[in-house]
Image (cartoon, coloured by chain):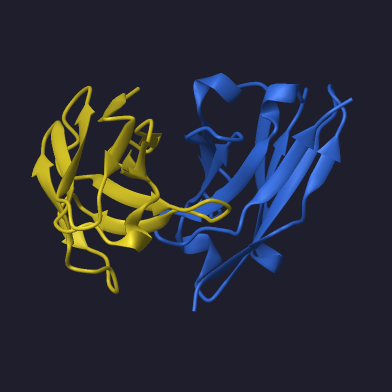
Amino acid sequence: DIQMTQSPSSLSASVGDRVTITCRASQTIHSYLNWYQQKPGKAPKLLIFAASTLQSGVPSRFSGSGSGTDFTLTISSLQPEDFATYYCLQTYSTSWTFGQGTKMEIK
Amino acid sequence: QVQLVQSGAEVKKPGASVKVSCKASGYTFIAYYMHWVRQAPGQGLEWMGWINPNSGGTNFAQKFQGRVTMTRDTSISTAYMELSGLRSDDTAVYYCARDTPQPDDWGQGTLVTVSS
């Protein structure tokens, strides 16, 4: 099975900060990597698919990059509504794997 | 628009089974695999498996092999996930999610509480 290692597990940041979250796959997943945002009590919301494609309706301050085994999610200027938990998900294998999650907190 | 509507919350005793449904609308049900994902309180997302609604074929995470069953009823565009031998650590919100190149269609979640 493909393992996904996401870091950091938590992140304290301020409004306006630029933040980066990383995910590393245990083997190549090409660009089959999605990023989700989840708020308490809600289903995950897709932000980025295919490693770098912004989902329709998602603000342009979110961006994704990477291919193969190393991927990043960047938020260029944190907004108050961005404080949430973020997950990566590989869909290269039909057995999906999520990263452990990154909880974004207000500094 | 695509909708996945799940059944309501359940409370079960240890050792019991639970069956969660996911009714799909707004697309051709048999055209897309359906995944099941769970989230224990305060924990991350955990993939459980998928069902191919066309063939009924399934694939499960090793952790759930022998305890999970996934079925479907194509006549009512509904997928089901049944988990047996429930333990307290199966307390979680269970989600269905449609498999597409940009998987953004999720059910609202079903809370399953396992408690004696």
Q: Quadrant of the N terminus of chain A?
A: top left
Q: Position of residue B91 (x, y in %)?
A: 70, 32
| In the image: residue B38, left or right of residue A92 | right
Say how many tags the image has: 0
User: Which percent across, then down, holds residue A49?
Assistant: 25, 55
Residue B67, located in which quarter of the rendered image? top right
Specify whether B109 is left or right of B14. left
Q: Who's the residue at 79% across and 38% down the image?
A: B18
Q: Is residue B49 above or below residue A45?
A: above
Residue farthest toward the bottom in the current orientation of the protein:
B1
Q: Nearer the viewer, residue A74 or A105?
A: A105
Picture quadrant where residue A90 is located = top left
| Residue B110 pos. (x, y %) | 68, 50
Q: Say which chain is blue.
A: B
Point out residue A104 in the picture as x, y percentages from the top left corner.
Answer: 34, 43
Residue drawn at (50%, 73%) of the image: B2
Q: Which residue is pictured at 31% across the width and 43% down the height? A: A107
Tell me if residue B75 comes above or below residue B67 in the rendering. below
Residue at the farthest front position:
A107
Where on the picture, by quarter, is residue A70?
top left
Can residue A104 be seen in this snapshot? Answer: yes
Q: Confirm whether residue B102 shows in the render.
A: no
Which chain is yellow in the rendering? Answer: A
